Image: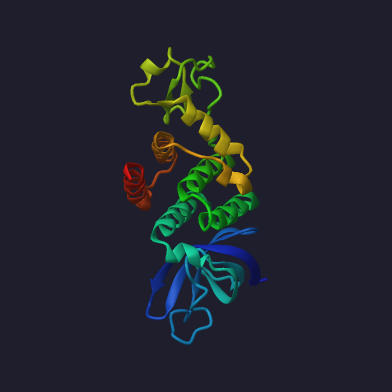
């Protein structure tokens, strides 16, 4: 069948021609899809208010040779709060840019879809930095890039002391004996490593219970930025802006 239904989240939108938009959807059953929404930029189009980044809804699409076509769409949640709050919108854009970079066209991943949907809901309500760090590490876990945090990633030895090295290249924490051999590793507090462990397994619906000090906010942000950069062969444009935003918030 050329026509099919999809439950999806719009993770990217770009204008095309005078009246159309190219849309990237993350769907629960069909994975990442690129499609064209014809006429959605016209003033009277029923799709105009729906074809926007972050919208979660039901879509009917028609399979095409290079691009599918969105023939019908109905919004379930627009996440308008993310578009009305510039800080929260910045984190939402970063999350969707990460998804666009890592998700594979046409490869279904129900857990990734659920993680994205819950994270967008939480971005509207909770501390956006906390939500984003939880999303980052869980995204890595789901894609098979889980960082090794329990013991030394190099020798398997115990992590001793209050300051611990972390190697993005090797993919985890380093003990005091192995750290000198990895000069590009970064040093963080044990509290930062423990926070990354919690973010990896904590019930997302109870995320607001967790609290991060300014130092842990900074260190988890630096670790995840470098860790993700090692595993993605494209630059995340919004990452630098987000780091500047978090630096200002930490100073404040």
Colour mode?
A: rainbow
Q: Nearer the viewer, residue 239 or 27?
A: 239
Please tell me which residue lies in front, 68 or 158: 158
Residue 5 located left or right of residue 100: right
Left or right for 17, reference 109: left
**At 46% across and 16% down in the image, what residue appears?**
161
- Pick whichever, 34 or 191, lies toward us: 191
Picture quadrant of residue 247? top left
Q: Taking 118 as reference, is 146 above or below it?
A: above
Q: Outermost residue toward the front?
A: 252
Q: x, y percentage for residue 224?
A: 44, 38
Which residue is rendered at x = 56% and y = 46% of the image? Answer: 208
Q: Residue furthest right?
A: 1
Residue 77 x, y percent position in the rendering:
58, 67
Q: Indicate the position of residue 55 as horizontal and vertical percent values.
A: 53, 66
Task: Tell me the quarter of the picture where residue 13 sits.
Answer: bottom left
Q: In the displayed structure, does residue 186 sit left or right of residue 99?
A: left
Judge whether residue 111 can be spotted in this image: yes
Say which quarter of the image contains residue 93: bottom left
Residue at 56% across, 57% down: 121
**Screen quadrant of the C terminus:** top left
How many marks are shown on the rendered structure?
0
Q: Quadrant of the N terminus?
A: bottom right
Q: Does residue 12 show up? A: no
User: What residue appears at the point 56 percent right and 24 percent down from the top-left corner?
Assistant: 150
The residue lying toward the viewer, choosing from 161 and 226, is: 161
* Identity of the residue furthest to the top in this view: 177
């Amino acid at each position: 069948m050329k026509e099919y239904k999809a439950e999806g989240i719009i993770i990217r939108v770009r204008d095309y021609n005078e009246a159309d938009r190219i849309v990237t959807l993350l769907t629960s059953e069909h994975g990442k899809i690129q499609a064209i929404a014809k006429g959605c930029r016209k003033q009277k189009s029923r799709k105009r208010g729906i074809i926007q980044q972050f919208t979660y809804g039901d879509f009917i699409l028609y399979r095409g040779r290079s691009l599918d076509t969105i023939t019908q769409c109905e919004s379930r949640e627009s996440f308008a709060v993310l578009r009305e709050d510039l800080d929260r919108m910045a984190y939402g854009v970063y999350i969707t840019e990460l998804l666009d970079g890592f998700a594979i066209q046409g490869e279904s991943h129900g857990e990734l879809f659920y993680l994205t949907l819950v994270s967008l809901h939480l971005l509207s309500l909770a501390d956006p930095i906390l939500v984003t760090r939880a999303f980052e590490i869980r995204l890595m876990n789901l894609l098979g890039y889980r960082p090794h945090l329990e013991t030394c990633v190099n020798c398997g030895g115990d992590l001793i002391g209050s300051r611990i090295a972390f190697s993005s290249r090797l993919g985890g924490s380093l003990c005091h004996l192995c750290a000198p051999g990895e000069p590009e590793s970064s040093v963080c507090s044990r509290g930062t490593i423990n926070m990354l462990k919690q973010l990896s397994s904590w019930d997302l619906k109870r995320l607001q219970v967790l609290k991060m000090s300014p130092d842990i906010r900074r260190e988890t942000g630096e670790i995840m930025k470098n860790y993700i950069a090692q595993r993605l062969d494209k630059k995340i444009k919004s990452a630098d802006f987000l780091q500047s935003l978090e630096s200002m918030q930490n100073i404040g």
